[in-house]
């Protein structure tokens, strides 16, 4: 168990490591590339496809996969540990005390974000004894090429390497939210991929500053910890190529009636950001096929795709999609379900 002294106004953060790296394999640490995920119960399956895609495209590289979660079933733990049948892979499951994030629950209540997104703020403190650098990844992306260039990238002189986000519509046009947040440098990054220099991150107290900002300026941080990280790391992070976090919007495609996946150039990580994911079988989008290719190679391969919308936001999008396809009766049924579920949520 790690007791991390990083939380403002609280004594400590409790993180239990379930699969610690044993002394017998500690010799691997120096040449093992560390990757971390923060997931809830809904994202273990998709994380499995992400891990499979990384391993398939980097067959000779040693990896240590860190998984931070509030809880994990025996099945999830067993599947995760079964990855170690590959001699190049080690895993660590870190169970985080969920109650420490209660103050942030209101921030994500009206969004599709999970409370687990905030756990990336404790990664550096939790992993500083295991490695001096870690690649944080959201669990809704796929690796489609090798990561050699990233592993040899010199990051000694920076706190973190980050990637520009898509342009967000603001009063000043699609400027990436830097005007809204009044950043000194006109760059705004997507926090779904961060290559972190742990000693510099810790020395600069990035997590502590970010958490303090979240606690005191919740209303102006529409994208929660991502906005807060952009403010704290303004001018302190290095921006690298978009190929390391190529954001693909399935929602944009579906709104235009587009079901064929657009070319993604020389992307290494394709990030399916937004409410619609490639494991949503009901979307009918071609991205499903790319996901299925890697899902079939995952230790979660026996788990089916999501056959139907599972929350009110997905229901609304599905209803709109069906209407565009001329399936008006089905569209009406799903829109009625959307209204019913969203009303129940508001009345809670």
Image: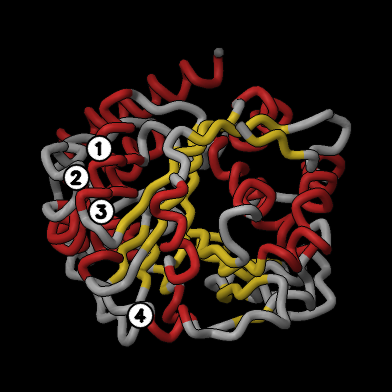
The x and y percentages for residue 305 are 17, 41
Instruction: For label 4, count other residues whose C-alpha is less than 10 Å away and answer few (under 14), some (14-19) or many (20+).
Output: some
Say which element carries label 4.
Answer: loop
**Depth check: 139 or 2 in front?**
2
Q: Secondary structure at mark 1?
A: helix
Badge number at residue 267: 4
Q: Residue at x 18, y 64 (%)?
A: 290
| Circle count | 4
Choose the circle earlier in sequence order: 2 or 3: 3
Residue annotated with mark 3: 49
Cα gap from disc 4 to disc 2, whole angstroms: 25 Å
- Distance of label 1 from label 4 (alpha carbons): 29 Å
CA distance for labels 1 and 2:
6 Å
Residue 342 position in % (x across, y down): 45, 25
Q: Does the rendering let one see residue 345?
A: yes
Residue at image mark 1 = 79
Distance in Å between CA atoms under marks 3 and 1 = 12 Å
Q: Residue 106 placed where, x, y %?
A: 67, 30
Q: Quadrant of the C terminus?
A: top right
Kindly indicate whether the residue at mark 2 contacts the one at mark 1 (C-beta within 8 angstroms).
yes
Marks 3 and 4, how far apart in space? Answer: 17 Å
Measured as percent of width and height from the top left, residue 295 is found at 18, 52
Query: Is residue 224 shown to the viewer in this render?
Result: no
Q: Are marks 3 and 1 in contact (CB under 8 Å)?
A: no
């Amino acid at each position: 168990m790690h007791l991390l002294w990083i939380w403002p106004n609280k004594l400590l953060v409790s993180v239990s490591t379930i699969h610690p790296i044993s002394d017998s394999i500690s010799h691997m640490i120096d040449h093992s590339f560390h990757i971390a995920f923060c997931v809830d119960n809904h994202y273990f399956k998709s994380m499995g496809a992400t891990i499979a895609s990384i391993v398939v495209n980097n067959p000779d590289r040693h990896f240590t996969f860190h998984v931070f979660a509030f809880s994990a079933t025996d099945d999830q733990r067993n599947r995760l540990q079964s990855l170690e049948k590959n001699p190049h892979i080690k895993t660590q499951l870190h169970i985080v005390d969920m109650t420490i994030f209660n103050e942030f629950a209101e921030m994500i209540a009206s969004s599709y974000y999970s409370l687990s997104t905030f756990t990336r703020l404790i990664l550096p403190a939790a992993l500083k004894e295991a490695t001096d650098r870690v690649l944080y990844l959201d669990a809704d992306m796929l690796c489609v090429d090798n990561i050699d260039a990233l592993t040899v990238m010199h990051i000694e002189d920076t706190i973190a390497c980050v990637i520009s986000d898509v342009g967000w519509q603001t009063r000043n046009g699609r400027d990436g939210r830097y005007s809204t947040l009044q950043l000194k440098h006109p760059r705004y990054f997507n926090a779904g991929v961060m290559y972190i220099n742990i000693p510099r991150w810790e020395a600069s107290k990035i997590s502590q500053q970010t958490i303090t900002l979240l606690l005191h300026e919740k209303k102006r941080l529409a994208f929660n910890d991502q906005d807060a990280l952009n403010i704290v790391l303004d001018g302190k992070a290095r921006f690298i190529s978009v190929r390391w976090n190529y954001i693909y919007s399935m929602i944009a495609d579906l709104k235009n009636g587009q079901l064929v996946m657009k070319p993604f150039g020389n992307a290494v990580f394709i990030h399916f950001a937004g409410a619609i994911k490639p494991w949503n079988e009901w979307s009918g989008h071609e991205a499903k096929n790319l996901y299925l290719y890697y899902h079939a190679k995952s230790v979660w391969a026996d788990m089916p795709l999501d056959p139907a919308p599972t929350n009110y936001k997905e229901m609304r999008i599905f209803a709109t999609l069906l209407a565009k396809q001329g399936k008006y009766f089905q569209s009406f049924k799903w829109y009625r379900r959307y209204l019913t579920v969203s009303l129940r949520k508001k009345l809670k």
